[in-house]
Amino acid sequence: MTMSVKIMPNPAGPEVAVLAYDGLCTFEFGIAYEVFGLPRPEMGEGWYRYSVCGIEPGPLRAAGGLTVVADHGLEVLEKADLIVVPGWRSIDAPVPDGLTAALRAAHRRGARIMSLCSGVAVLAASGLLSGRRATTHWRYVGAIAARYPDIAFDAGVLYMDEGSILTAAGSAAGIDLCLHVVRGDFGAEAANSVARRLVLPPHREGGQAQFIHAPVPQAREGIRLGPLIEWMRERLDEEQPIGLLADKAGMSQRTFQRRFEKTTGLSVGEWLLKERLRHARELLEKQGAASLDDIAAASGFGTVATMRHHFRKRLGTSPGAYRKTFAGVA
């Protein structure tokens, strides 16, 4: 498959600085390197420039028994275009004044600043999230929101883009946010290329809600809802009104909707939309000869216009463009 990649005209691409510190979260740090620091000659000139910024003298201890020696100190933040804060050493650990001052100065001159998982604690302590929306791992939202009531936390999303300030939810959501940044800087095809190198989808549907721990359903609920969910999945091309589903589950509509959401982490409508998008994507990838009308009908969207609307809204692309990019790719 031939793939063209949008390249920024400036031969010196955006400069990315990733923070390192004692107690470094190695997974989030690795995400930032993999997306922004790994050499990618297929992208041509103008790709990201990468450096590591130690916020304190090294060597620095990292999770997993590793030791990190950073090449630069806080001075690199004076020229960075994008600053990445990996997961902080603890959601309630103090943040050095020198770091918060450097981040505020970088933001004032126009740098973008991005946190991954508990790295949001650093942005919050710097005052950069005051009056803004943000996210972090769902386990931390309650604790940090209580300390910073002027920040509008959303525990249900994978990441939040507030322009110059970006925040990611749990650790793996950092990948979603990094790909989002690549998509904005270099275009969708470049982000798709990086995603494929990572063996990941370029978009993940849904948010953290599907991962938040919920009470285990009672045995009777599991018996009712398990087979019903499979029945729903096998009939995505059919109308599935709440009344019909509740009757099949032997529950009132209100009880059914409440227990379905506890079991799946999603409302009935959101679950159906997610499953229909998944099925439509599978058909687009595997059935190259099928018409868009047939795929829209088979996946339960009814019309191509409806399917196109949801692809644009949820995936940032059209069904035709998705097929062109992914059809025939193993």
Image (cartoon, helix red, strand yellow):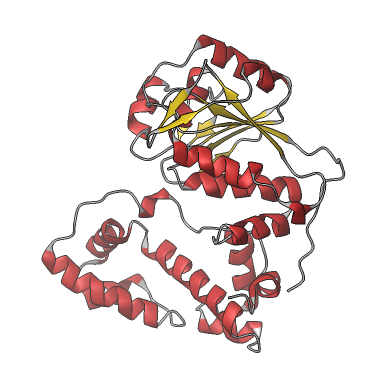
Residue reaching furthest to the left: 219
Q: For residue 240, what is the image quadrant? A: bottom left
> Which residue is pictured at 31% across the width and 73% down the height?
229
| Figure disc tally | 0
Q: Residue at x 53, y 22 (%)?
A: 130
Tell which of 119 and 254 is nearer to you. 119
Q: Position of residue 106 (x, y in %)?
A: 67, 20
Nearest the eye: 298 or 1: 1
Image location of residue 242, percent across then percent down: 34, 70
Residue 210: which quarter of the image? bottom left
For the N terminus, the image quarter is bottom right
Q: Relative to 206, is 191 on the left or the right?
A: right
- Return the residue found at the far bottom: 289
Which sits in the foreground, 172 or 289? 172
Q: Give the residue displayed 48% in from the left and 18% down from the top.
A: 125
Residue 162 seen by the camera: yes
Query: Image check: 229 left or right of 28?
Result: left
Residue 247 visible in this rendered orientation of the protein: no
